[in-house]
Amino acid sequence: MKTRRRTYTAAFPESVTTRPRVQQVLPVSPTITRRKLRSDTAKERKNGGSKKKKCTRRELWDKNIPTDMLQEILSRLGLKGNIRASLVCKTWLEASVSLRKLQTRRPWLFYPQKESEEGDYILLDPSKSQTHHLKFPELKNHQFFCSKDGWLLVVTDSPSNLIFFLNPFTQERVYLPEVSPEFNGSCLTFSAPPTSTSNCFVIFFRYRYLDTFVTIHTWCPGESVWTKHRFVAPYYGFSTLECLFLNGLFYCLSTIGHLGVFDPFRATWNLLPVKQCPAYSRQILRGREKWITEHEGDIYLVTTQRKNNYKLLVFKLKLEDNVWEEMGESGLMVFASYASSFTIAGHSAKERNKICTPHTDDYGRLSGYGKDTQRFLSNRIAWLQPPHNVQL
């Protein structure tokens, strides 16, 4: 019994637009028509088959579109369009699935609204250019120290050193116990949202120049006081630049490139024998213009090169060799801010090897959405990871 062979075609959403150069390549060559394909197929059947395999209509999609251009086209589709495109042929299926794995939630920008009352904030989705106006009266004389999974760790100057969690998407707040006077603007970070009571650790790292010890204060949800840990340590640096939580450990990077590791479960501290990153020896940039971030379980140090039009430089930590390896073309897209930095794999050529930072003026107010680090990153602006179902 003969069965009818199913034929699938790709239906692209009307909202998807392509560049003119793509539209010029998409049409199949005019010399290849449906009538000619049917004629060739009939001749082949009559002659008992041909030794040379004929191209079918579905194979022509593969032969006429270069791989780079195909990925560029598919990267512009949403999830539904990606799934439909994967039905065209085997080549499109492989490209669609690979891009589908790369797709992830892109960070939103949270910043104060210009020329308005204090506490007026904007949540910006840069990928869709959508803005949401929110009001948080408690955000006055404050700083954002860390951002993770949609939550912000906020410190206010008045009242002095009041620390609390804030989720701008859900309006939730969680207040922490009064912090020790030793805090004094130290590096402050957390491992998981406060809703994850078993995995949430908040730490602030304290080290004074030429000290022979490191002090780390920790807090977990449900505790009424901070726990103080003090470790004897060799020369660490001037202070801690950034802290990153990964695989159950806090990696603390100093201003001179030393990398320390704090285990909150065992309450241990170790200074790793990692060679100084080349970004420090070259004196490319100083201060908060270096960030540590993670991608797929690996740690990266990101900075820019002023002499080369602020080109993005990425160094990958090779723990087995205790070195930072420079990545020529990392393919990463970095969202950097004072609070936290997030990294995704760039989908298109324009997004790869790119850094996105909010431009700020001398008063820390947002003055644009850009890609370089020529201006200071305000501690009142932060990237946020949106939840899967955003409802504002």
Image: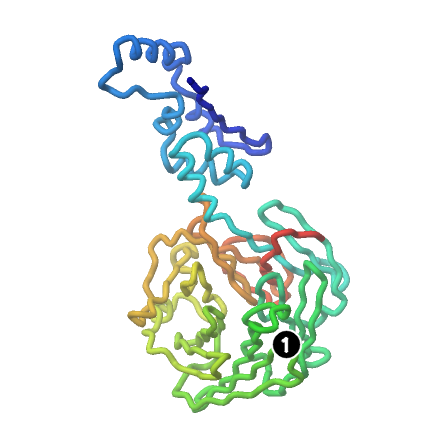
Q: Residue at x 47, y 44 (%)?
A: 100
Asked if one can make out residue 88 in the rendered structure from this viewpoint, the answer is yes
Secondary structure at badge 1 equals loop
Asked if one can make out residue 361 in the rendered structure from this viewpoint, the answer is no
Q: Position of residue 14 (x, y in %)?
A: 59, 30
Q: Name the colour scheme.
A: rainbow
Q: Position of residue 302 (x, y in %)?
A: 43, 62
Q: How many marks?
A: 1
Q: Which residue ends up furthest to the left in the rendered image?
A: 51
Q: Position of residue 326 (x, y in %)?
A: 33, 61
> Which of these two is toward me, 242 or 303?
242
> Mark 1 — residue?
221
Q: Against 176, is 16 above or below?
A: above
Q: Residues within 10 Å of mark 1 (few under 14, many from 20)?
A: some
Q: Which quarter of the image is occupied by the N terminus? A: top left
Q: Which residue ends up furthest to the front in the rendered image?
A: 1
Q: Against 162, is 132 above or below?
A: above
Q: Residue at x 42, y 78 (%)?
A: 260
> Which of these two is toward me, 55 or 234?
55
Q: Taking 14 as reference, is 212 left or right? A: left
Q: Taking 187 as reference, is 33 left or right? A: left
Q: Residue at x 40, y 76 (%)?
A: 259
**Quadrant housing residue 319:** bottom left
Q: Amino acid at mark 1?
A: Pro
> Which of these two is toward me, 159 or 265?
265
Q: Residue at x 64, y 85 (%)?
A: 225
Q: Taking 87 as reference, is 367 left or right? A: right
Q: Position of residue 131 (x, y in %)?
A: 68, 50
